[in-house]
Amino acid sequence: MSRYRVLALVTIVLSVFSGGCATSPAARFYTLSPVQVAETTPAVRPIAIAIGPVTVPDLVDRPQIVSTIDANSVSIDEFARWADPLKSQVGRALAEDLMLLIPGSVVSVYPQRTTGSGYGVSVDVQSFDSPIDGGAVTLAVIWSMRPPKGNAIDGRSVVHEAVRGPGYDALVNAHSRALASVARDIAMATRSALGQRN
């Protein structure tokens, strides 16, 4: 093989590799966030609330965002990822929502910080559905709020939240709003327990 042919072959191979690298999409990273509450609630005496443990379905417990195609298939997007583990984000978003819903509360995502006077909240996310074609996200959560004294208050929240626009930004925002609805249910249970203690 002549030197010119070798140079031409090397040039073609390099252009293919450089062209392939140039067209690879960049990964985007997403986070759940607290939702500003419109309702005004009176402040409570300072109380400590600890969120945890938090569990999520194995299917969505991965860095990639998993979208639901239909009842029997999903899409896993390698370039749309959670910025940190989903169960960490769920706990953090709930904690921030609860601090907004129960002014005066101090909410941690570390369950071992619960003391004899603190409230504990465990969260089991049973469904975290993200439709690929818009529609509404579905969030089903079993939670348990344990007051310092007395019996735990158990609840199940099922939320359908419309995806307001195309793309993953709108999808993640819908999940954030759905988690805020779950936080409202937990806040009501906490206020009920506080009323029983007063």
Image: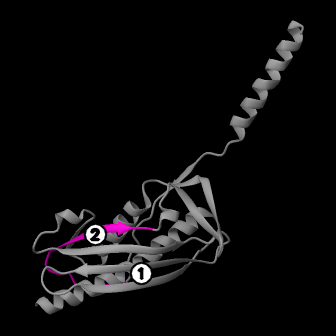
Q: Nearer the viewer, residue 10 or 100?
A: 10
Is residue 51 in the magenta section? Answer: yes
Give me the disc on residue 104.
none
Q: Nearer the viewer, residue 165 or 107?
A: 107
| Total marks in image | 2
Is residue 117 in the magenta section? Answer: no
Near mark 1 (Cα within 10 A), the count class, few <14, some 14-19 or many ≥20, is many
- Which amino acid lies under the numbered mark 2 shown in the image of this protein? Ile
Secondary structure type for disc 2? strand
Residue positioned 58% across, 48% down in the render: 27
Residue positioned 79% across, 18% down in the render: 10
Instruction: Report x, y in % for residue 81.
Output: 53, 54
Q: Quarter-wise, where is residue 90 in the image? A: bottom left
Task: Check the image and report above or below for 98 versus 64.
Answer: below
Instruction: Report x, y in % for residue 101.
Output: 30, 79
Quadrant where the C terminus sits is bottom left
Give me the disc on residue 51.
2
Task: Check the image and report above or below for 171 versus 41.
Answer: above
Q: Quarter-wise, where is residue 137 in the image? A: bottom right
Instruction: Report x, y in % for residue 35.
Output: 41, 73
Instruction: Report x, y in % for residue 140.
Output: 46, 79
Q: Is residue 141 left or right of residue 163?
A: left
Highlighted range, magenta: 39-56
Residue at the limit of the structure toward the top, as seen here: 3
Task: Check the image and report above or below for 121 versus 81.
Answer: below
- Which amino acid lies under the numbered mark 1 shown in the image of this protein? Ser
Work out how far the residue at label 2 is from the one at label 1, CA to CA, in angstroms. 16 Å
Residue positioned 31% across, 82% down in the render: 186
- Residue to which mark 1 is pinned: 181
Q: Quarter-wise, where is residue 93 in the image? A: bottom left
